Image (cartoon, rainbow, N blue to C red):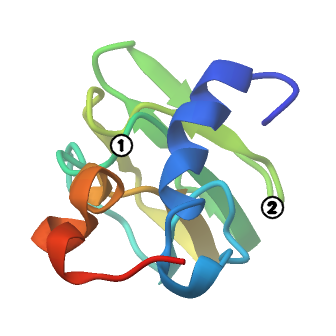
Amino acid sequence: MKHELPQEYDHIEVYCNNLPLNNSPGTHPFSGIVVNFCVSTDSHRDWSDNLLCVVIPFGTWEDGEIVLFELKLVIKMKSGDVLFFPSCHITHFNLHFSGLRGSIVLHSDGTGKNWVDNLNGWGNHVLST
């Protein structure tokens, strides 16, 4: 991602670079992870996501394509494929499937800006070295 989408990477990474105790999550540059097992979703937007999310499906299944509604795209993914898209701006869902299908979703919460800007309002109460 850093090589192909450097501006997006830098925008998202700032949240991971400001975590307490200088922690760096294994999901870097994303600060959050969701693991889905055998889920077909209703159409939705992830309003609180920051910029991009990543979907990586796994398992053995048939059908279950991901739909990006406004783009009029139906995407057939295989286990281990990687899809980046702005989940807060595009209505998306996946179709019904048969078999075992899971997905790893990496995202960053848009409210993380509150932490970066002022430690969620605790900026005046935290000592830094």
Q: In the shown orientation, is residue 82 left or right of residue 129? A: right
Q: Which residue is nearer to you in this view: 110 or 20? A: 20
Q: Label 2: state its secondary structure.
A: loop
The numbered dot on residue 50 is 1
Specify few, some or many for label 1: CA neighbours under 10 Å numbering under 14, 14-19, or 20 or more: many
- Residue 31 to residue 129: above or below: above
Tell me how far mark 2 sits from mark 1, CA to CA.
25 Å
The residue sitting at 36% across, 82% down in the picture is 127
Q: In the shown orientation, is residue 85 left or right of residue 46? A: right
Q: Amino acid at mark 2?
A: Ser
Picture coordinates of residue 88, whole percent (x, y): 27, 37
2 or 1: tag closer to the N-terminus: 1
The residue sitting at 56% across, 86% down in the picture is 21
Residue underneath mark 2: 79
Specify few, some or many for label 2: CA neighbours under 10 Å numbering under 14, 14-19, or 20 or more: some
- Residue 122 to residue 21: above or below: above
Can residue 24 be seen here? The reply is yes
Q: Quadrant of the N terminus?
A: top right
Q: In the shown orientation, is residue 57 left or right of residue 116? A: right
